[in-house]
Image (cartoon, rainbow, N blue to C red):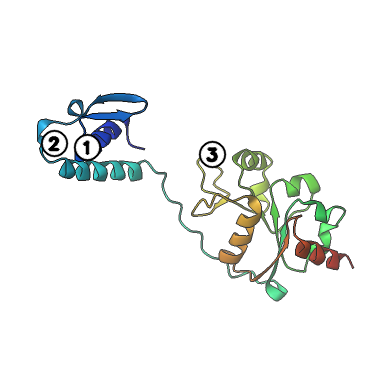
């Protein structure tokens, strides 16, 4: 974000373009002439255009570096190209997750491997505190661990998605399975959809 001085100058230029002599920002009001020189006031539209370029460039310069997009993994292709997205909903209570072994690629979420001692092929966790806790438990050393490119995620062993979609772990895991892992038929267990419950119950039989 641009500094306050730059924002005051930008707001003053906008006010000058509107023909106003005062400018209000951050709950305060001041004279436009206090922020713009007489030369800048002679052509406020030109001044505004220059300030907008400066503020836009400054905002881009302060952004964190973009993480490279991990290569799409197409080497592992389980039979039927099925991917089980294992969430922590009520619909799979008392279900033995070990029944999924050998039936497809398993994608778990958050503390699944530590709490339930089931280690999926990959794990998704987007909450920074959860990611740090899992790193302390050395989870990223034992499976493929994914998260967003957030500043609090420091562990280099974690695969970081190129863009922060702002989603929870469930939909994020699904999109990673489809776009990065190239698995074509995700079976969902979010704990809220009837389709998911039917698929899980079918595995119990």
Q: Quadrant of residue 76?
A: bottom right
Residue sitting nearer the eye, 29 or 96: 29
Residues under labels 2 and 3: Cα distance?
Answer: 42 Å
Report the mark closest to the observer, 2 or 3: 2
Q: Residues within 10 Å of mark 3 (few under 14, many from 20)?
A: few
Left or right placement of residue 37 versus residue 22 in this view: left
Residue sitting nearer the eye, 24 or 2: 24
Asked whether the residues under the numbered discs 2 and 3 touch, taking CB atoms below 8 Å apart as contact, a structural biologist would say no
Asked whether the residues under the numbered discs 1 and 2 touch, taking CB atoms below 8 Å apart as contact, a structural biologist would say yes
173 relative to 112, above or below? below
Of the numbered discs 1 and 2, the one sitting upstream in the chain is 1
Q: Which residue is mark 2?
A: 40
Left or right placement of residue 3 versus residue 19 in this view: right
Q: Which residue is mark 3?
A: 152
Report the mark closest to the observer, 3 or 1: 1
Of the numbered discs 3 and 1, the one sitting upstream in the chain is 1
Left or right placement of residue 19 versus residue 70 in this view: left
The spot of residue 25 in percent (x, y) is 33, 29
Check disc 2 and report its element: helix, strand or loop. helix
Q: Which residue is mark 1?
A: 13
């Amino acid at each position: 974000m641009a500094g306050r001085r730059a924002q005051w100058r930008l707001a003053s230029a906008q006010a000058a373009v509107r023909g106003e002599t005062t400018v209000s920002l951050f709950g305060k009001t001041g004279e436009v002439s206090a922020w713009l020189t007489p030369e800048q006031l002679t052509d406020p539209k030109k001044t505004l255009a220059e300030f907008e370029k400066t503020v836009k460039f400054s905002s881009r310069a302060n952004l964190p570096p973009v993480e490279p997009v991990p290569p799409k993994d197409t080497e592992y292709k389980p039979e039927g190209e099925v991917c089980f997205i294992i969430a922590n909903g009520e619909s799979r209570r008392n279900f033995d997750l070990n029944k999924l072994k050998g039936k497809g690629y398993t994608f778990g979420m958050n503390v699944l491997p530590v709490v339930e001692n089931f280690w999926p092929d990959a794990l998704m966790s987007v909450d920074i505190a959860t990611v740090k806790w899992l790193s302390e438990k050395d989870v990223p050393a034992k499976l493929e661990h994914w998260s967003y490119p957030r500043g609090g995620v420091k562990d280099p062993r974690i695969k970081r998605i190129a863009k922060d979609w702002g989603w929870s772990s469930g939909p994020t895991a699904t999109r990673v399975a489809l776009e990065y892992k190239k698995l074509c038929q995700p079976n969902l267990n979010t704990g809220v959809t009837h389709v998911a419950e039917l698929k899980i119950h079918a595995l119990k039989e």
